[in-house]
Amino acid sequence: MFSVQSLVRHGKVVWQGATEHERGHTSPAELGIGEENLLFEANAEAVRRHAVTEGTAHAEFQMSRGQPVLVAFATWVPEDIAALWHLATGERLGEVEHHPAPRRRARQIYVDNAVPGRAVRLEPVLSNAPAGIRAELPGSILFDAPFGITTDCFVDRFAA
């Protein structure tokens, strides 16, 4: 399952990013260029069909026979996914006209042992900063790593 987050200005998608949903969320999704292009084309069509002219959008897709199939659409971006894109790009969704490309890969995993109400302030990180945990949300942990560094060690650390 994948979702695509979008910034829309004057009826046009000015930025979009794909998030993968497997044991949590990963932003940006690890996709080939062809798959990403298919998702982005399907997302732009969903934005057009839902007549979104300004703001943010969140579309969820399942892949079927190599093609994206829209399963949900909203004119807002879920808080946890917005936080992941903040970690990946260093900017908050909707606060800049043209969202930058991701500098890092951010992941969210669901855990049974996360401490509710104990959240670490989210801050943009430099692309050369060490990988690390950036926030704990009720039921999940958010962390990031420079591209090319696996984040599986964090998943193993918190999946109990």
Image (spheres, grey):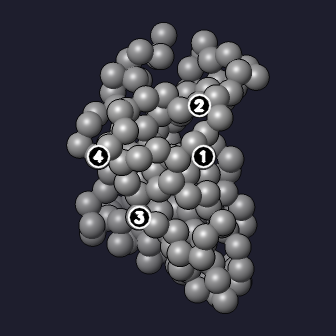
Kind of residue at badge 2: Ala
Kind of residue at badge 1: Ala
Mark 4 crowd level (few <14, some 14–19, many ≥20, 10 Å Cα): some
Mark 3 crowd level (few <14, some 14–19, many ≥20, 10 Å Cα): some
Could you tell me how far apart the alpha carbons at marks 2 and 3 are, in whole angstroms? Answer: 21 Å
Kind of residue at badge 4: Phe
> Quick check: 51 above or below 61?
below
Secondary structure under tag 2 reads strand
**Is the Cβ of the residue at disc 2 closer than 8 Å to that at disc 1?**
yes
| Residue denoted by label 3 | 101
Secondary structure under tag 3 reads loop
**Is the Cβ of the residue at disc 3 closer than 8 Å to that at disc 1?**
no
Residue 135 x/y as whole percent = 59, 31
Could you tell me how far apart the alpha carbons at marks 4 and 2 are, in whole angstroms? Answer: 19 Å
Q: Decide if residue 79 is on the left or right side of residue 46.
A: right
| Residue denoted by label 1 | 83
Could you tell me how far apart the alpha carbons at marks 2 and 1 are, in whole angstroms? Answer: 9 Å
Give me the residue at 55% from left, 27% from top. 141
| Residue denoted by label 2 | 135
| Residue denoted by label 4 | 147
